[in-house]
Image (spheres, rainbow, N blue to C red):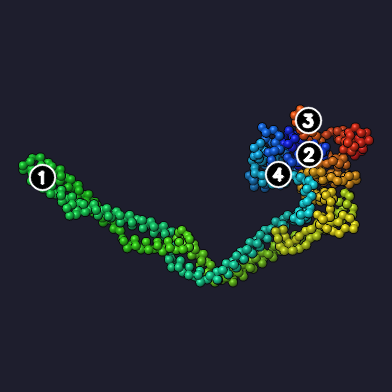
Amino acid sequence: MIRSLHISNYALISQIDIDFTGGLNIITGETGAGKSIMLGALNMLLGARADAKVITDSSKKSIVEVEFTLEDPQAFYDFFTDNDLDADGERVILRRELSPNGRSRAFINDSPVNLTQLRSLALRLVDIHSQHQNLLLADPDYQLRIIDSLAANDNLLSDYRAAYADYQRLLKKYSETRDMIRRGRDEADFITYQLEELASLDLVPGEDAELEAERDRLADMAETKRYITEALAALQGDENATLALETAVGALRDLAETIPDAETLSSRLEAVLIEIRDVASAIEAYDNDYNADPQRLDEIDSRLGKIYSLETKHHVDSADALISLREQLSHQMEMLDSGDELLSTLEADARAAKKNAVLIARSISERRRRCAAEFSDELRRVAEPLGMKNLRCDIAVTSGKLNHSGIDQVEFLFAFNKNQQLLPVSQTASGGEISRLMLAIKSIVGKKMNLPSIIFDEIDTGVSGEVASKMGELMQILSQRIQVITITHLPQVAAKGNSHYKVYKLDDEQTTNTHIRQLSDDERVSELALMLSGSSDNQAALAAARSLFD
């Protein structure tokens, strides 16, 4: 239930802090006092659009924060686990902040979350019901959800959705395979040609990369061989450096007889000659090692040319992709060869899945039909004291094709007068009648389900007298199971509350601010008198108010 509410810097609200109680909480106040502003702020927690125009003081952010008390924390374990959030026992705090620049931030237990997460949890904690939401009653999906809720179909629906999804998956697989086989048979000759062309290459994974590496290595070897040949020609070829040095050494020896220093020069030059001969021997060794095979290089270029040609033809970029295409075409041909058998198997699988889904859907449909009859009777009984003694209700459950929710369509048909035919609610009910119907429905659903706290926003508009009192009693009965907060202008409803809060405005020299406070018992009597007569001092109104309150 809602434990406390904090709103600050939002429209006419400078700051309010209020604690709510269990049971039936009543909120009253004059028109324009700010009750709708409070609801607007609360709707921000349900993901409503945040507009910076609501910020009164542009130097501060606007904050809406609600603290909830969980009766069954374990029921929310999956939410906190799935969203990686820390649970805080029986307490949950939702907060939304709006900055003057329009930026909005959301928090759950002080952890930042996105709006989807905030809304998902908020909808499990509070249901804000206003008059415009009465349009939901005309929505077939909403009507179906009511019946499923009362029939306790959650587990069966979960099983059905899994079975239906399995059927849809298998049906799609059958359709896609059938269409592929049809196309394949039209293109069988071309597929065979492509497959033979790819198979003739006999590709292995990674072959193109290995061939490219070998080609580069052989190309480098040819370049190296050319440099080695040039070096050996300079050292050992005709008129090479070695012969020139040998001639120079001999000439210097001959000069030694006449020039004493020539012997030294000859020895030095002979040492250089020996070194050059060693270098030449080393280069010869390289020459023996680097013998590129031109034929192998041609073979590699030819092989890569064929691979590149097919890659271009099939719009792929590797031999591995060609291998994948080859396997795909091979699989396609196998499917064509055994297509009829494969389609028969897939069709049988889809039929079996459909049969399973239909069996579950029929079980759900039976429960819906039983529940619809019971719900129709109970709705008439609950709605009768609300001024609808001639109400007739028929919950029509008709079967059709399989869909995401089963095989049924549900339609609520009503007649509010004896001489009326049964019609959809949108064609026969007034706004006040729809409001009373929704209250009756939620009171029935509330008895059988753990609904969140519910806030009624003036759904009792347009009623008075005994009907108003009965609406208050119904809210009081509903509040015995869940927390109910209702905004009302009816003293008959307000008198039924466990707690009563008044919304009012106060002016200062510069601003008008909305406030809210909880009323004492004496103040409640005065407020009821004000609602009855327009004056809290009217003695007759005070006596009537005491009677209502007692």
Q: Return the residue nearer the eye: 435 or 108.
A: 435
**Mark number for residue 179?**
none
Q: Position of residue 218 (x, y in %)?
A: 33, 57
**Which kind of residue does numbered mark 4 sit on?**
Ala
Indicate which label's residue lies in the foreground, 1 or 4.
Answer: 4
Which residue carries the number 2 mark? 35
What percent of the width, then of the height, locates residue 536?
88, 33
Side (left or right) of 262 relative to 458: left
Q: Looking at the picture, does residue 433 appear above or below residue 421?
A: above
- Residue labelled with disc 3: 507
Q: Sequence order check: which comes first, mark 4 or mark 2? A: 2
Task: Confirm whether residue 531 shows in the render.
Answer: yes
Q: 244 and 50: which one is in front? A: 50
- The residue where tag 4 is placed is 48
At x 35%, y 63%, the residue is 299
Calculate the distance from the C-alpha at mark 1 to the C-alpha at mark 4: 107 Å
